[in-house]
Amino acid sequence: MGNSRISSSGLDPTKIYANADRSVVLIQGQQIGPMSTDFGTGNVSQAVLGSGFVIQYGTSDYIVTNYHVVQGMVNMTVTFSDGNTYNATATATDPYADIALVTATAPTNEFYPLQLTSSSSLQIGDPVAAIGNPYGYSGSITTGIVSQVGRSVQYGSSTGNATFPIADVIQISNPINPGNSGGPLLNVNGLVVGVTTATISGSEGLGFAISSNTILRELPSLVTTGTYTKHSYLGIATVDMTYQLAQATQSKVTYGVLIEKSVHNGPADLAGLKAGTYEVYVQGQQYIIGGDIIVSINGVRIVNNDALSTYLESNTQPGQTIQINIIRAGNPMTLQVTLGTRPPPQ
């Protein structure tokens, strides 16, 4: 008889928790923001909490969390699993990836780093465990599976990033609640494959995690400069192609992304990519059609916006020239586009 705690998936939550719990911290503080009352508008302080986990980079210990956890936070503290609490500071942030690094005034013996591994190894259906502090219930573990990879998620204004989706996101079935944000997503070997970040309100078994590949790619820059500025930029607004949209645009292509708008003198505009020219309604939804349909980049099929965002984030850098295959008025074309750098977050 083997260990009866090991599930049929090969994940042993007891072992993973025993190895990782002391690495996970509770992050608390106040976020100050405007609020309207009968007496006018003023700033109010709201208590907020989230999760984080310890990693080591070089010889220094850092706590990884989400940007939206520490955004605007004052009087920040981190509490370790032994109950000890210390003052903390966010030393690096990237709103575009919803990642932040935090340092704490804790002695070295409080830090037990977790190991990051490439999220490229993940397969759909792989078991994963998440540890965090949902609603302040510290050190909670949940298990689930990888539901999909390469998602892109748009949070709106909560991350100060309403314009660009967060790319290369892992979709998981683990229950994710407020307070879980910033905690580690772990594979069967207890290695970090992501940072739990969000769920969709009212959903069940629909959580998301920033991929560890994103963290690994950004860490050198975050540690040395306090930010990350290598997000590629095309300067376009796009929508996923659908069968109905293809019918409306008289296109034979039912996949790819349709360019609705482009930024004047942006990378796509300078390369000759064309945006839409007139509005139509398809199934009650307004679209700007007449623009190019992007169907592949550097030979890689671009099925939808998820694929576009993830490809650009994972495989390109500003200044790089890429080959974009498009359909224009029913005809396939290839254009060379030199990528720009995203403008700073608002």
Image (cartoon, grey):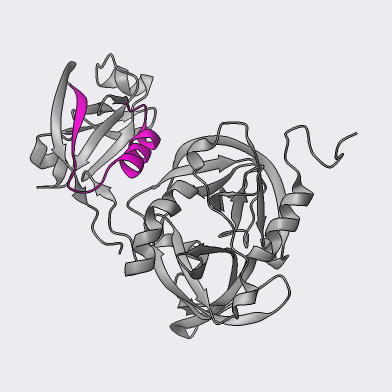
Seen in the picture, residue 53 relative to 105 is either above or below; the reply is above
- Residue at 53 percent across and 52 percent down: it is 116
**Of residues 3 and 240, the one drawn nearer to the viewer in this rendering:** 3
Please tell me in which quadrant of the rendered image residue 189 appears: top right
In this view of the protein, can residue 79 be seen by the observer? no
**Of residues 39 and 65, the one drawn nearer to the viewer in this rendering:** 65
Seen in the picture, residue 165 relative to 30 is either above or below; the reply is above
Please tell me in which quadrant of the rendered image residue 131 appears: bottom right
> Residue lying farthest bottom?
39
In this view of the protein, can residue 111 be seen by the observer? yes
Residue 294: where, in percent of width, then height?
25, 28
> Residue lying farthest right?
1
Magenta part of the chain? 301-327
Please tell me in which quadrant of the rendered image residue 26 appears: bottom right
Residue 76: where, in percent of width, then height?
54, 79
Left/right placement of residue 273 relative to residue 210 reads: left
Seen in the picture, residue 86 relative to 182 is either above or below; the reply is below
**Of residues 206 and 123, the one drawn nearer to the viewer in this rendering:** 123
- Residue at 34 percent across and 26 percent down: it is 241
> Residue lying farthest top?
252
- Does the stretch in magenta take in 54? no
Seen in the picture, residue 79 relative to 6 is either above or below; the reply is below
Residue 47: where, in percent of width, then height?
59, 76
Residue 188: where, in percent of width, then height?
67, 42
- Residue at 17 percent across and 35 percent down: it is 275
**Of residues 123 and 249, the one drawn nearer to the viewer in this rendering:** 123
Left/right placement of residue 126 relative to residue 9 reads: left
Q: Exactly how many numbered labels are in the figure?
A: 0
The N terminus lies in quadrant = top right
- Does the stretch in magenta take in 320? yes
Left/right placement of residue 187 relative to residue 343 reads: right
